[in-house]
Amino acid sequence: MVPGWMIRVLGPIDVATAEGVVTVGGPRPQKLLGALVLAVRHSASTADLIVVLWGERPPEHAVNTVQSYVSRLRRLLGRETIVNADGGYRLEVEVDGLDALLFERLVRDARAEGDPTKVRDVCRRALRLWRGPAFGDLSHEDPFRLEAIRLDELRILAMELQLEAELALGRSDLIVGELEAAVQENPYRERLWYLLIEALARDGRRVEALRVCTDLRRMLGDVGLEGGEGLSRLEDRILIGNNL
C-alpha cells in the first residue's frame, strides 16, 4: 500500500490518501474489505468470504465474483496488500495503514503511560480516528457486529482515560460539560459518573456533585443494583469537604 495511505473502518469503510478519501465500491466490496480487516494478517478463506458477502445462498459464480472484487481492491491498495494465502486471502498492512490497528496501539500506549499530559494527548489522537460507528452501515451485521462492539468499548475506555488525565491536570472546570454528555451517552459506565462527581466537587460545585451521586444511585437501583462502598466514600468526602 502507498505510504501514508490508511484503510479506515472506524466509521464508513474507505481509504484515506494524500489526495483525499477514496471509496471502495458498493456494499459487497466494502464487506469484503471489512472481512479482510477482521482477519488482518491472517487468512480469510474464500468460502468464509462468500458467506460474508451472500450468506447461505451465494450466486453460481460466487468464487469468480470474489476474485473480481479482490482484483479491484488490489488495483486500489496494491497487490502486496492483499495476498493469496491458504485457499483465501490475507490483508497485509502496517499499524499506520489501518485505523483500527493504530487506535488499539494508541490505547495500549495510553494505558501504559504514567504522565497525564501524555495520556491526554495520546487519547486525543486515538479518538480523532473515529468518524462514526465502526464499519459504518455494517456495524450491526454479522460478522462485524461483535468487533464493532469491542472497538466501541475501547473508544469509551480511551475517552475515560483522557478525561481522567484532564482531571489530574486540574482542568475540572473545562471537562464537566464533556463528562455530563458522556454520562448521558453511556449511563452504565460508572467510571464516567465518578469522574463527573469528582470534577464537580473539585470545581467547588459540591451540591451538584451530591445530586449526581443521588442520580447514580437511582440509575443503579432501576436495574437492580446498589452503589458500592466507593460511592459512599466519595459522598462522605464531599460532605466533609475533603479534597478529592
Image (cartoon, rainbow, N blue to C red):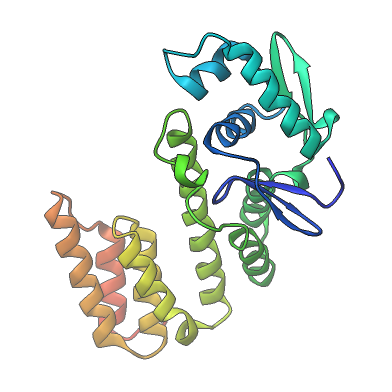
Q: How many marks?
A: 0
The quarter holding residue 127 reads bottom right
Quarter of the image for the N terminus: give it: top right
Q: Which residue is painted at 43% across and 75% down in the image?
A: 178
Q: Which residue is painted at 60% across and 29% down in the image?
A: 32
219 w.r.t. 224: above or below: below
Q: Residue furthest front?
A: 60
Q: Which residue is painted at 69% across and 67% down in the image?
A: 118
The quarter holding residue 139 reads top left
Residue 157, horizontal then vertical, whole percent: 49, 54
Nearest the camera: 89 or 60?
60
214 w.r.t. 239: above or below: above
Q: Which residue is painted at 57% across and 14% down in the image?
A: 62
Residue 55, horizontal then vertical, whole percent: 43, 18
Nearest the camera: 53 or 232?
53
Can residue 244 be seen at all in this image of the molecule? no
Can residue 80 be seen at all in this image of the molecule? yes
Residue 233, horizontal then vertical, whole percent: 29, 68
61 w.r.t. 134: above or below: above
Q: Residue furthest bottom?
A: 204
Q: Is residue 51 left or right of residue 78?
A: left
Nearest the camera: 196 or 48?
48
The quarter holding residue 218 reads bottom left
Q: Is residue 84 left or right of residue 199?
A: right
184 w.r.t. 9: above or below: below
Residue 185, horizontal then vertical, whole percent: 34, 63
Nearest the camera: 53 or 80?
53
Quarter of the image for the C terminus: give it: bottom left
